Image: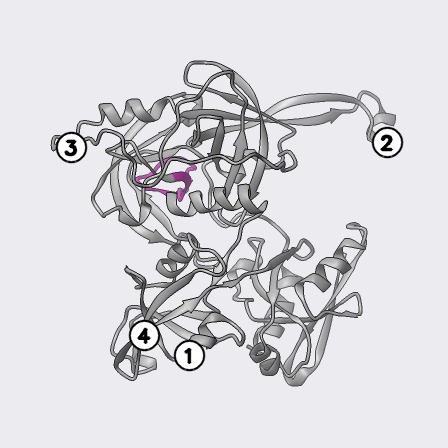
Amino acid sequence: MKKFASLLIVAILGGTITLGAYKYLEDEPILPTTTTSSTNFNPVNYKGTPITSTNADFTEAADRTVHAVVHVKNVQISRKPRTMQDFFNGGGELRKGLVGAGSGVIISADGYIVTNNHVIDGAAELEVSLNDNRTYKAEVIGTDPKADIALIKIDADDDLPYLPFGNSDNVRLGEWVLAVGNPFNLTSTVTAGIISAKARDINEYDSNPQSFIQTDAAINPGNSGGALVNINGELIGINTAITSQTGSYVGYAFAVPSNNARKIVEDILEYGDVQRGILGIIPIDINANFANQYDLETSEGVYVGSVDSNTGAAKAGLQEGDIIVKIDNTKISKISDLTGYLGAQRPGDVVEVSYTRDGKLYTTPVKLTKYVTYVIEKPGIEISEASKEALKEMGVKNGVVITKAVNEQLQRYNLSGIVITAIDDQKVNSVEDVKRIISEKDSREPISINFASQNGESKQIIFN
């Protein structure tokens, strides 16, 4: 962990802050969050008439879906200078302009809609068009940029058609699915394909393992935030990303699993933000080289690199070197399997963790711990609380730990685990300390950050 400090300094000084680790379906960009009244979402065990056709007839599923998928338009306000004085003083004519458009899925009769955060990000105004051409202004209820999910709401005069959540844990490879959205502003477009892969992490360099459903149903710019449904018309994913050198569909696309999206929506409505639960370990993927290096008998599972004190994993007796192979009834082959399953859980939930140690299989209940993070916009890094082990490793008594970089230049480096001991010459002991210091600053002012180096030494970098 100590060797990361010098790497961080080189990386930050040489990098420029840019956003985005992979190509989203849109550039789209909202309004402040607002509290809402309670809404009952359709249960996972949907009681509608099942579609049992063995001939892959998608007509009923398409009809159920197309009326519940909307067109989301992102409107931003810009100022056009009319004179040279306007240019220098920031004056001029205010203009509204459409900067992007995507899709959304109605999930309740009273107008709650799930979409992608990047579809609505930065909007001054949101416009939602239904399949029957009715148009409404929408408000943002809450967002989760980490998972790229947003919840918005429209107020209609009558009950709206909506999609029930399906259980994304039950999707199978090769299962038929439909993708419904508004690619290239072609409203209410339906495409068909299969589940190509599960628990897919499409950016291994961002220190933020994702767990996408991969499909070969054709998805293009404008499909962002749209529905991925099974043959019964149940929502199993929110179409989110593609990887493409051209920016258009090249054979596969990715969706946030519905269980994760549903949990985020419920958190926003109940708590106002997203509640993330963690085991309290540093996970490491196992591959053939890693297995050979550590003389392991398996190339699957998640290797426990370390265990944070005062977490559920520590209290349950997990140790460095254990290999997690299963959580509840879900097989764990890689980190994205682990993060995908935990993404649908909350702090305080108890999960059954199966792991191997010295060739023997054990199972123990683990209570998930709340995960608290904060992003320091300059230089663009996310932090969390530092464990006693991390502080001891770096030879310091206080600090917070970097969990990941949030800009493209730094994401190529593994910065997770580096300890920040002070900001603007003020010692930091917690994430709350960092928030307080940052909140008291003018964002235009330089910020100095002290990073723990070898033997407890500190190196300071000033960011302008």
Magenta residue check for 250: yes
Span highlighted in magenta in the image: 238-255
State the CA–CA distance, disc 2 to disc 3: 65 Å
Q: Position of residue 357 (x, y in %)?
A: 31, 81
State the CA–CA distance, disc 2 to disc 4: 60 Å
| Residue type marked 3 | Thr
- Tag nearer the camera, 4 or 1: 1
| Residue type marked 4 | Asn
User: Label 2 neighbourhood size at 10 Å, few (<14), some (14-19), many (20+)?
Assistant: few
| Residue type marked 2 | Asn
Assess whether mark 4 and mark 2 are in contact (beta carbons under 8 angstroms). no
The earlier-in-sequence mark between 4 and 3 is 3
Q: Give the SS element for disc 2.
A: helix
The C terminus - image quarter: bottom right
- Which residue lies at the image location 54% right of the left edge and 61% below the top edge? 371
Q: Which residue is mark 4?
A: 289
Question: Any mark on residue 78, and which?
Answer: none
What scheme was used to colour the molecule?
Answer: one colour
Assess whether mark 1 and mark 3 are in contact (beta carbons under 8 angstroms). no
Q: Position of residue 315 (x, y in %)?
A: 46, 76
Question: Any mark on residue 89, and which?
Answer: 2
State the CA–CA distance, disc 3 to disc 1: 46 Å
Q: Give the SS element for disc 4.
A: helix
The answer to whether 173 appears left or right of 207 in the picture is left
Q: Is residue 257 visible?
A: no
- Which residue lies at the image location 84% right of the left edge and 22% below the top edge? 83
Q: Count how many numbered circles sit on residues in the image.
A: 4
Q: Which residue is mark 3?
A: 52
Q: Give the SS element for disc 3.
A: loop
User: Label 3 neighbourhood size at 10 Å, few (<14), some (14-19), many (20+)?
Assistant: few
The answer to whether 209 appears left or right of 287 in the picture is right
Q: Which residue is mark 1?
A: 317
